[in-house]
Image (cartoon, grey):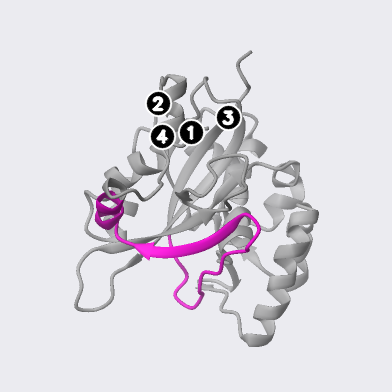
Amino acid sequence: MIAKPRDAATLILMRDADRGRSGFEILMVRRHAKSAFMPGAFVFPGGRIEASDYTRDAEKICHGLGFSQAQDIIADTHPPEKALAFFVAAIRETFEEAGILLAYREVPDFVALDEEEKTRFAEYRKEMKKDPFSFTRIMEREGLKLATEKLFYFAHWITPEISPIRFDARFFVAAVPAKQEALEDAFETTAHMWISPQKVLQEHKRGLPVPYATLSNITVLAQFSSVAEVIASTKNKEIPAILPSLTLEEAQNELML
């Protein structure tokens, strides 16, 4: 019996290389070795859509993007609440797994956490794992709005039918907030790294475990020289659903199982 793919969202965070160096880097996190799906692999932050991402309250915590605008971007998704849910989930999952929060207190500046806030927000990440609905409440309590308009739709991948765990995943790209630092959660993710797309491709040949869909997106990213170029490429971009057809052995080799 073919497993039904679950809706999911993935966020590719990017930053331009330090002064004196060309190109840009992407944030990758390492999945826990005991994960049921792609254990030990280096991936982008992301995860499945939760019921909490669909609610009317979810729209209230978003800035610059509502239900109808989200559906204009992800036109093959219905209802509009579901389209916006992909954006919300991408930000929520990235905060949970990597500690980066794309949100504003005062637009257009991303929130920058001081030492006291870092401690408080670390507890929020733990709270969210127990109760996904707490994310909306936390944002409201902190007076934050999600920077959903800063996410740009980049790709659409569906896990092969041979896999017992499947996802219908939307990939987004975004520039990372300048005053935030990544921090794995030690539960879903155990490490993180900033690395150029070109370097990932090189390291993969040497054995770096990177899933097929992730690697394919990185191959596309390697064609660009800056964060601005990547974002510009998403304008009016046709984004077809990609469903790889793999054998069981191929899927295992490509970390799809």
Which residue shows up at 75% across the image and 46% down it?
A: 52
Asked if marks 1 and 4 touch (Cβ < 8 Å), the reply is yes
Tell me: residue 119, above or below residue 92: below
Q: Amino acid at mark 2?
A: Glu
Which residue shows up at 49% across the image and 51% down it?
A: 11
User: Helix or strand or loop: what does disc 2 sit on?
Assistant: helix
* The label number, if any, that marks residue 38 in the structure image: none
Select label 3 or label 4 by which is in front. Answer: 4
Real-space Cα separation, disc 1 to disc 4, in angstroms: 5 Å
Residue 139 seen anywhere in this rendered image of the structure: no
Residue beneath label 4, please?
A: 254
Asked if marks 3 and 4 touch (Cβ < 8 Å), the reply is no
- Comparing 155 with 81, the one in front is 155
**What range of the chain is rendered magenta?**
175-203
Asked if marks 2 and 4 touch (Cβ < 8 Å), the reply is yes
Q: Amino acid at mark 3?
A: Arg
Looking at the image, tell me whether mark 1 or mark 2 is earlier in sequence order: 2
* The label number, if any, that marks residue 256 in the structure image: 1
Real-space Cα separation, disc 3 to disc 2, in angstroms: 15 Å
